[in-house]
Image: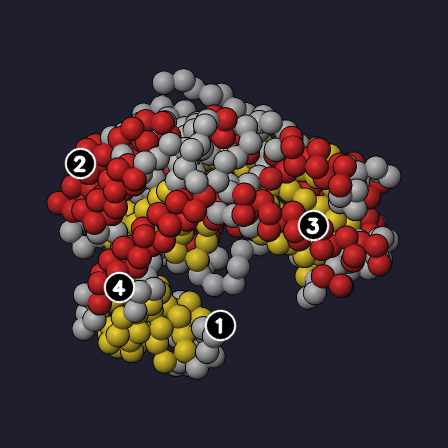
Amino acid sequence: MQRLEIPVVSYNARTAAFMTARGFHRDGCGVWRDAAGHSFAASLAGKEAPAAATRTWGCQMNEADSETLRGQLREMGYVDAPVDDEADVILLNTCAVRGTAADHALGEIGRLKRLKTERPELLLGVCGCLAQMPETVEYLRRHAPHVDLIFGTNNLHDLPGLLQRAYRDEAQTVDVWDQAPETVENLPSRRAPGVKAWVNIIYGCDKFCTYCIVPTTRGRERSRRPGDVLAEVERLAAEGYREVTLLGQNVNSYGHDLGAYDFADLLRDVAQVPGIRWIRYTTSHPRDFTEKLVRTIGLHPKICEHFHLPVQSGSDRVLRWMNRGYSRARYMELIGHVRRLLPHAAITTDIIVGFPRETEEDFLQTLDVVREVGYDNAFTFQYSPRAGTPAARWEDPVPPAVKKERLERLNELQYAISRRKNQALVGSMQEVLIEGPSRKDPDVLTARTRTNRLVLVPKREGVVHRFGRVHVTEAQTWTLYGSLAEVEPGV
Ligand code: SAH
Ligand code: SF4
Ligand code: F3S
């Protein structure tokens, strides 16, 4: 085991040094202001109370990063822009995992050109995983000069300095780091309203699956120190948060760089934090998944019995080409531990179809695994070549129409299984966290079960963000329906 010795620094200390050197101090609300009372944001934008908007693509880690961006914007003194037309700063936090994700972000960058032409004082920033790719930076340099600022995932905590440079410099400001030279703690975060919070526990990924861009966009694996994670969870509990989701591209490698303290130990310790009711985590890589982890989850009722265990393929040779580091038999052994120790746990997965040279026979093995495990849900993707990854250079005789058809067949099978699994819950009582009004129907509330299923219940006043129990009366492929049998008092 190699110890990575990445220094840990405090966001607060560093930002305080930056701000005080420029004559700013924190006011009672935590906003940086100068002696005349103007916020740092006002000094940048040249107007009082400038507004900012952020947009996010990608995974939960990107969502969490956007909360950090918004936390920094608030401390600088930006207010929320209700619409883009009223924004002084727009930050696009992008994803690069598949071509479609990249295309969405690039399309949005193109559309914002009109706004920037109408209002040249608008500051447009592009960050996140796509910005970590040299080809994107080159593309934006050439084709999107209306983008003022490009920065990456490894320096998003430097937002005040980055914005200051982008306002000052005539040319496009580009500052992207290949690696994180340090782990930054005490990051400000502006979380979504409610009682659920994301908590990063490990950054980066060292697995280098041959199709995946993430090790490039997120750098080497580095675990946060257990004490820092636990302090954050304790703070969240004190602020009224009741559910935490521990985040990492591969939470099961947590601690490899720390010594004899692993993810199961961290889960056990997070489960001791008073006030936290439910603990979730994502994503588990099968390679580092242990029976100890399943046992730990079984021992602590706060840890939700939901395993997201991406299989990617059911064919051993495809798994080898993917560099996943497990065989189908080993994967099924892990599923066996879960089924044996926690028979009521939900199991979900990610699957890629149409990997280069995947044959019909390989694909049928994937369908086999799907049937054999009986996943509660699966995120299914058509393989998308990503520049810079090994698989993107490999010959790929599989025609796109065949890949598309395989995806449809896989989805058809999985939808039937998901529906059957949901229907088996009709008549049962499920513990839920009530989230809020449904976007489609204000007379309906959405709630989540411990296994992360969506349940719709008729609206009742005063129950949002509380835990309760639902009697399930009806089930469809994606959704359960029911009635609230009991609701716990609020906190
Ligand atoms: N760290 C997580 C996954 C992160 S990306 C893990 O290893 O499980 C989320 C999912 O996107 C992956 O599980 C994979 O199924 C899919 N994915 C990643 N790269 C892809 C590519 N090039 N084409 C298609 N799907 C891809
Ligand atoms: Fe990508 Fe593999 Fe790392 Fe997941 S484990 S982020 S799929 S390289
Ligand atoms: Fe996308 Fe980056 Fe997440 S590539 S999936 S936002 S780690």
Residue at image mark 3:
109
Residue 362 visible in the snapshot: yes
Q: Which amino acid does label 2 sit on?
A: Glu
Nearest to viewer (mark 2 / mark 3): 3
Q: Which amino acid does label 1 sit on?
A: Arg
Compared to 250, does 418 lie above or below? below
User: In the rendering, at what x and y percent does residue 34 appear?
Assistant: 81, 49
Real-space Cα separation, disc 2 to disc 3, in angstroms: 46 Å
Real-space Cα separation, disc 3 to disc 4, in angstroms: 38 Å
- Local SS, label 2: helix
Q: Residues within 10 Å of mark 1 (few under 14, many from 20)?
A: few
Q: What residue type is labelled 4?
A: Arg
Q: Quadrant of residue 445?
A: bottom left
Residue at image mark 2:
333
Coloring basis for residues: secondary structure
Q: Is mark 4 within 8 Å of ligand 1?
A: no
Residue at image mark 4:
419
Q: In which quarter of the image is residue 42?
A: bottom right
- Local SS, label 4: helix
Real-space Cα separation, disc 2 to disc 4, in angstroms: 25 Å
- Going by the picture, which residue comes out furthest to the top? 2
Nearest to viewer (mark 2 / mark 4): 4
Q: How crowded is mark 2: few (under 14 residues within 10 Å), some or many (20 or more)?
A: few
Residue at image mark 1:
439
Q: Do the residues labelled 2 and 3 touch (CB within 8 Å)?
A: no
Q: Residue at x 47, y 75 (%)?
A: 440
Q: Nearer the viewer, residue 314 or 363?
A: 363
Which of the labelled discs sits on residue 325, or is there none?
none
User: In the rendering, at what x and y percent does residue 96 appear?
Assistant: 55, 41
Quadrant in which the N terminus is drawn: top left
